[in-house]
Image (cartoon, rainbow, N blue to C red):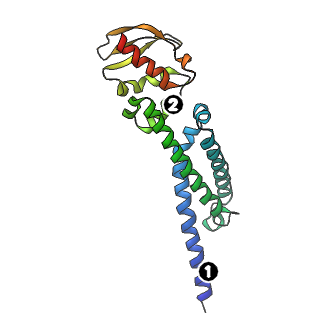
Amino acid sequence: PFLDDCLEWEKTVLLIQDVFDYWLKVQVTWMYLEPIFGSEDIMKQMPTEGAMFQTVDKNWKKIISAGNVDPKVLAVIKIDGIMKMLTEACDLLDTVSKGLADYLETKRLYFARFFFLSNEELLEILSETKDPSRVQPHLKKCFEGLQRLEMDDKCTQISGMMDRGKELVEFVKIIKPADAKGSVERWLLEVEQTMKES
């Protein structure tokens, strides 16, 4: 006499498991990618992946809002189209993650010293193209013996480099990061060349 009820509950429990498996996968990936695609510079450099992430972001916030209205499990699994939204979000986030990995690889191939940085450090550098001072903490990993670059107060010109012993080496020419038009790797290549000449 309980067979129909048991089968219905089994179906419900399996749906709950599927929803929360996808929910957790989307949440973890979204939390990793959200600050990255919150950067204007990254959005400009990766417009296709940025558009995909914005689609996921919109749907994810819709799911979260609906879950906040009634957070009971049985109510959450009844959110209209939740499984479809979560599976699509998962697929899009996989595509975005792969595009991001390819993007970072091209940056590393262009400027080999980026191989010394983790993905998070490289993304921090690439998302701060307008502010060269934000690159300073990562330079020690890119250039052996370099503690920091000597910049003017507004960080518009780089005039030298300082080692760990606080010895300043003046560059033979002034480097202006703004001339690289938002490409961190271009002005870092110029720094590398100027270091060799100085």
Seen at 63% across and 68% down, the residue is 74
Instruction: Determine whether 176 is above or below 5 in the image.
Output: above
Question: Badge 2: few (under 14), some or many (20 or more) residues near its Cα, within 10 Å?
Answer: many
On residue 8, the disc is: 1
**Residue 75, percent from left and from top:** 66, 66
Q: Nearer the viewer, residue 132 or 31?
A: 132
Q: CA distance from mark 1 to mark 2?
A: 51 Å
Split into 4 quadrants, where in the image is the C terminus? top left
Residue at the image position 57 percent from the left and 55 percent from the top = 91
- Relative to 4, does residue 124 appear above or below in the rendering? above
Q: Amino acid at mark 1?
A: Glu
Q: Residues within 10 Å of mark 1 (few under 14, many from 20)?
A: few
Q: Which residue has dot 2 on it?
A: 126
Q: Position of residue 157 (x, y in %)?
A: 50, 11
Total numbered labels: 2
Residue 17 rendering spot, x and y as whole percentages: 54, 68
Q: Is residue 100 left or right of residue 79?
A: left
Which residue type does callout 2 highlight?
Answer: Leu
- Badge 2 marks a residue whose secondary structure is helix
Residue drawn at the location 55% of the way across and 38% of the way down:
36
Kindly report which numbered mark, 1 or 2, lies closer to the viewer in this rendering. Answer: 2
